[in-house]
Amino acid sequence: MAGQVKAAPTFALTPSSERTPTAQNYLTNADFNWLNQYLPDTYEKEFERYGNRTISSFLRMVGAEMPTNSDLIKWAEQGRLHTKYTQVGCLAAVAAPQVSFQVNDVLDPTAAAQVIRVGQTLVVVKNDGSGSNKAVVSAVDNTGGGRGEFTADFYEAAGFTGGTGVNNADVTVFIYGSEFRKGTAGMQGSLESNDFIFENKPIIIKDTYNVSGSDMAQIGWIEITTEDGASGYLWYLKSEHETRLRFDDFLETAMIEAVPAETNSGAAAILGSAAGAADPGAGSDGIFYSVQQRGNIWDGGNPTVLADFDNVISRLDKQGAIEENVLFVDRQFAFDIDDMLAAQNSYGAGGTSYGLFDNDQEMALNLGFTGFRRGYDFYKSDWKYLNDPTMRGGLPTGAGSGRVNGLLVPAGSTSVYDQILGKNAKRPFLHVRYRASETEDRRYKTWITGSAGGAATSDVDNMQVNFLSERAVCTLGANNFFIFQE
């Protein structure tokens, strides 16, 4: 029978950080009775049983940080260069050399910007797949009730047979060029470029640590250690440094998970601006939210065979076609990719093949892959945030669980207009904007208040360490991203 991981003993999820000292944080006489005549043999240094507990690093690998001095960040992204309409109705149902069409404003959201002009040549394809034609536009009428109508004269003598009805979606058309008779006037009308404008707003992230002056002067017998190098025998150092590490993680996870507050929501009510101030709204567009709204979504399980990735690649072809991409995945998705690639070996089903690349029986067998190429380059990287059991790791599966198994991020940068520099600049697809000016830098603020630990700001016998940042993430070209979710 198949083996399984037993439910007990399990991994601990109880946080070690508490508001007050507890038996879980400090050793008591019940653990070691110091009045006993027998001295216990103690290990002074803490054992790091969970290894490196921090989960931030994703944005440091794929992004950058830049200042902003506004409550609102706006950027423009290019629209398509060429024109195609997929919901076009036929106004005539006869086989004729000339047929009138209507770009359907009900079925096609781009109909309001209908840009077909007289003299342009079209490819006309029936949406039921039954035929296609080439045509030249002989007349255009954009005044008929807001609908874009045009007349097409076909190059084929047999003409075209279509459906009827102003709200039909009979054909797809796209412009491939133009043709004019000798001695005629030029193209009538010109086209203006149309950008897509996106925006985001920074959010304020805070944390604090408080310790009394007496506890600062109390030494312990345990030598503490943290991921950022804190060491010594003062327990408050551990708590202060772990607060800092937790805040560092939140700076990244808040940019990943943030969502805008919906109108009339509870968050919108309590996070709105103070009276008299301009209200930019609560929440922010995090990476997951931006990709779910403007990017590509794979759901219903991980892609596990090449045919699945072919569907992903087909969608990328229709987007920006970025040559290199990085897949940040959880452990199961990483295994699925490894198994898919291993299955491409013709000897994979019957055992391990030897000989290529000196892969003999004496060496350790590498069953993992760092990437592959199929039309595009895909590099695979484990994402600790998706594996950590105290964060997204181990979330339940299901259509409504919101579980995310991976994120495809295009590598490289794109050109945008930077309002701070006043010119076009290269920016990573993902980057963080933090609030800053000549007098206030809110990228990562930390300050100490109280009357202990070197502070002298009040008569309270404590030290309070404060942390603050105000930032937002900009997801440029979200149409080039893929999110893999349930």
Image (spheres, rainbow, N blue to C red):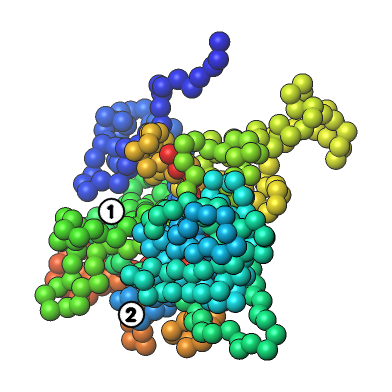
What residue is at 58 percent from the left and 84 percent from the top?
Answer: 187
* Residue lying farthest to the left in this orientation: 275
Left or right of 458? Residue 480 is: right
Q: Which percent across, then down, holds residue 448?
A: 28, 70
Whole-percent x, y for residue 203 in the image: 30, 66
Position of 474 with respect to 319 (left or right) is left
Per the image, the residue denoted by label 2 is 70
Reply above or below: 444 against 224: below
192 versus 405 height, above or below: below
Tell me residue 146's x, y (percent). 35, 71
Of the two numbered discs 1 and 2 on the same chain, state the one appearing first in sequence.
2
Q: Residues within 10 Å of mark 2 (few under 14, many from 20)?
A: few
> What's the mark number on residue 218?
1
Contact, CB < 8 Å: mark 1 with mark 2?
no
Q: Nearer the viewer, mark 1 or mark 2?
A: 2
- Residue 257: image quadrant is bottom left
| Residue 139 visible to the viewer | yes
Which amino acid is tagged 1?
Answer: Gln
Please give the name of the residue rendered at 55% of the width and 61% of the height, measured from the top-left corner: 173
